[in-house]
Image: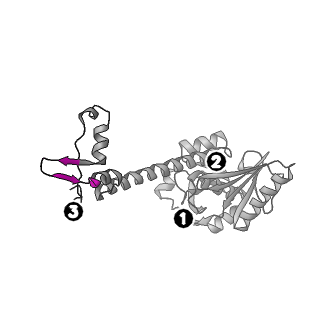
Amino acid sequence: MPFHGRRPPTVQCTTLPASRLAETGATWHYWNSTYVTTSASTTTTISWDGWCGWNAAYEETRKQRAAREQAEQRERVARARERHDAAKARALALLGEFLTPEQLAAYRERNGFEVRGSDGGRYRIRPGSQSGNVQQLGDDGVPVASFCAHPPGSLPDADAHLAQMLALVTDEIGFRRVANCYAYHPADPVARAA
Amino acid sequence: MSIMHTLDRDGDSRIMWDKDNPDEVAAARRQFEDLTGKGYMAYKATGKRGEQGERLRRFDPEAERIILVRQLAGG
């Protein structure tokens, strides 16, 4: 329903001269400006303002609005994903500058890299998470406990791991003081899997 | 040329300074003091490996690399 239930406008009609019919766009332009019909007995003039108005003003239907909002949401998600991926790559590059090639390979391909704490403790910082990802290792390399401490602020994982490493190598006792600790039982699958 | 990394959700933002340039040193010092005043932890890394790092409590213009990060919290 082009007029959305409203009263249709009046229409003024005029006959387009034949000589003008060949002009490109003339018919469409004329149709959009005025439209007048004349009969033998009466002349009916109706202003086709509605058609001009229809072409000038555009009201979005509910369905069109929903489609537009969905498209805008998809674009926002795509931009957020791009930003996240760029941050992740940047953080990994920075962490890589602090690790030996062996540590970086272990971080990427295996179960994390090892560092020595400032108080002599042996730790492994595992990728994939910022919570509970710091393991304390025994002399035999088997994990004996995990620690959970990370910087707030939704940092990329690699940034958090860099912060954990710096905290351990500069102030191991301070790190253990703030971190939550979970001690592994010897029969714990995590300890056995290491 | 020295560099200071502030770890954030976009990876990190960086400020570089030449220790012989007073303006650049002043700008880096301002950033350092502003963030450490807000509770950020500062670490100085000597060379490329963190195992040679130390906590910084005051800005050191001679530092090659400084890392600023918000204080760790137990999770």
Q: Is residue A140 above or below residue A154?
A: above
For mark 3, what is the residue? Answer: A7
Q: Position of residue A25 (x, y in %)?
A: 32, 37
**Could you say which is closer to the camera, residue A20 or residue A112?**
A20
**Residues under labels 1 and 3: Cα distance?**
74 Å
Q: Name the chain under label 3.
A: A
Q: As drawn, which residue projects farthest toward the left?
A: A41
For mark 2, what is the residue? Answer: A95
Mark 3: few/some/many CA within 10 Å (<14, 14-19, 20+): few
- Tell me which residue sits at (56%, 46%) in the image: A86
Foreground disc of the pair 1, 3: 3
For mark 1, what is the residue? Answer: A182
- Dot 2 amino acid type: Leu
Residues at discs 1 and 2 both on one chain:
yes
Residues at discs 1 and 3 both on one chain:
yes
Task: Assign the N terminus of chain A to one quadrant of the image.
Answer: bottom left
Q: Is residue A23 above or below residue A55?
A: above
- Dot 3 amino acid type: Arg
